Amino acid sequence: MKVIDLFAGCGGLSLGFIQNGFEITKAVEFDAEIAKTYSENHPQTNMIVDDIANIDNNKHFFEGEADIVIGGCPCQGFSTAGARIRKDFVEDPRNYLFKHFLNIVKTVKPKIFIMENVKGMMTMQKGEIFREIITALSDKEIMDGEQYHVYYKILKGIELGIPQKRERLFIVGIKDNEIDFDALLLDTKQKILQSNERFFDKVNIKDAIANLPTVSVDGFVNNPKATTSYEKYLSSTTAIISNHIKTNHSEKAVERMRKIGNGENFTSLDETIKSVHSGAYGRLCWDEVAPTITTRFDTPAGGRFIHPTENRTLSPREAARIQSFPDNFIFVGNKTSVCKQIGNAVPPKMSFYWANFAQIVLSQSVNYERAATEEANETCGAG
């Protein structure tokens, strides 16, 4: 079963499908540095490093080359233009990223597409943006005559055994056949539980990162023994793991962190902290989950990302663990790029969930097509 990943980032969305036996044939990523991380971890994939606007054509994609198209289409440019006219909304230049995702789906004509985005998309402009997207993806005229039945679901990290409060919106399109979406979601959970009965167990910070050793200057540390089920799920057989690097905080920042207890933040300090984040200088608790991992998890003023017992922020490896990346996943690039890669990534456990869902849908589709063929053959024989 073949998959194309658009707006691929470092490969979190791809990884869950790979873990479930899918082949990612092509991936598209605009940022060359981020694309290096993707290729480092998914060398078998044809990585296209380019603006999606330059490759939205039949020179790069063709009908039937993949069963599934996935992608985290950025929403920053969405406008409210064409609130009552589908085509105007798609053609609005401010919505070009969505347009090119849609155009590649129209070219490839996959059996399934999955578009990931922020939960807030549903309430942008009082929901008008979301309604436009759903309606456009369901419109046969816009989709060149193909009928996609579109469904959506907000996945909560906590409910998938991910130790953070991350919530992501997933829009799913199924070609031709309507499905009982809620029933298939229940089937997906049962399918996963058959192979991993601890997959959905609640996980806290201690379960996720407590076994990691002291951070190092270069980020390379000895592979620790996994003790919790979550650590075992992400564990690697390699002798060394990477990206567990020390952040060089200023003496003033370290002194501030010393004064902050578990669950506290900058309000515990006897000084004014200039930060737009309400959780600035927040310290994590072992027995709780983290807030959503952002691209600024290495910055004390960026949110509640201070280690539960050490006077430093999370290392990239710790943030990756909280995002559900396995320990053998290597992040390439400078500190700013690596933090961006991890903070913007789709947690692989979320992707793994949708890969199992897709397997069920595709198997049902194969059975349906087989039954239809057999019925046609019987009718022909009777004639």
Image (cartoon, grey):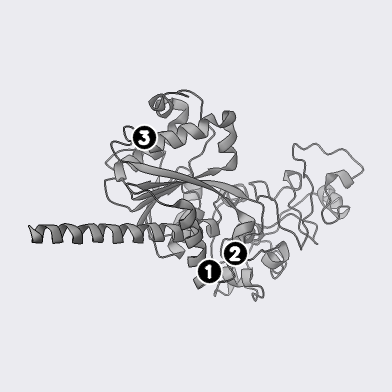
Which badge, 1 or 2, comes first in the chain's sequence? 1
- In this picture, is 93 found above or below 226? above
Which circle marks residue 193 in the picture? 1
Instruction: Pick the quarter of the image with the N terminus.
Output: bottom left
Name the one closer to the observer, 101 or 140: 140
Marks 2 and 1: in contact by CB < 8 Å? yes
The number of discs equals 3
Q: Left of 34 or right of it: where is 369?
A: left
Residue drawn at 59 percent across, 59 percent down: 160
Where residue 194 sits in the image (x, y, percent)? 50, 72
Residue, disc 2: 200
Q: Could you tell me how far apart the alpha carbons at marks 2 and 3 are, in whole angstroms? A: 36 Å
Mark 2 vs 3, N-terminal side:
3
Quadrant where the C terminus sits is bottom left
> 10 Å neighbourhood of mark 2: few (<14), some, or many (≥20)?
some
Image: 96 above or below 298: above
Q: Residues within 10 Å of mark 3 (few under 14, many from 20)?
A: some
Q: Amino acid at mark 2?
A: Phe
Marks 2 and 3 close (CB-CB < 8 Å): no
Q: Is residue 19 left or right of residue 249?
A: left
| Camera-nearest residue between 182 and 53 | 182
Return the mark for residue 139: 3
Type of the residue with mark 3: Asp
Looking at numbered disc 1 in the image, what kind of residue is underneath it?
A: Leu
Q: What is the residue that sits farthest to the front in this orientation?
A: 382
Please tell me which residue lies in front, 63 or 44: 63
Residue at x-position 74% and y-position 40%: 277
**Residue occupying the far right of the picture:** 270
Q: Is residue 9 left or right of residue 339?
A: left
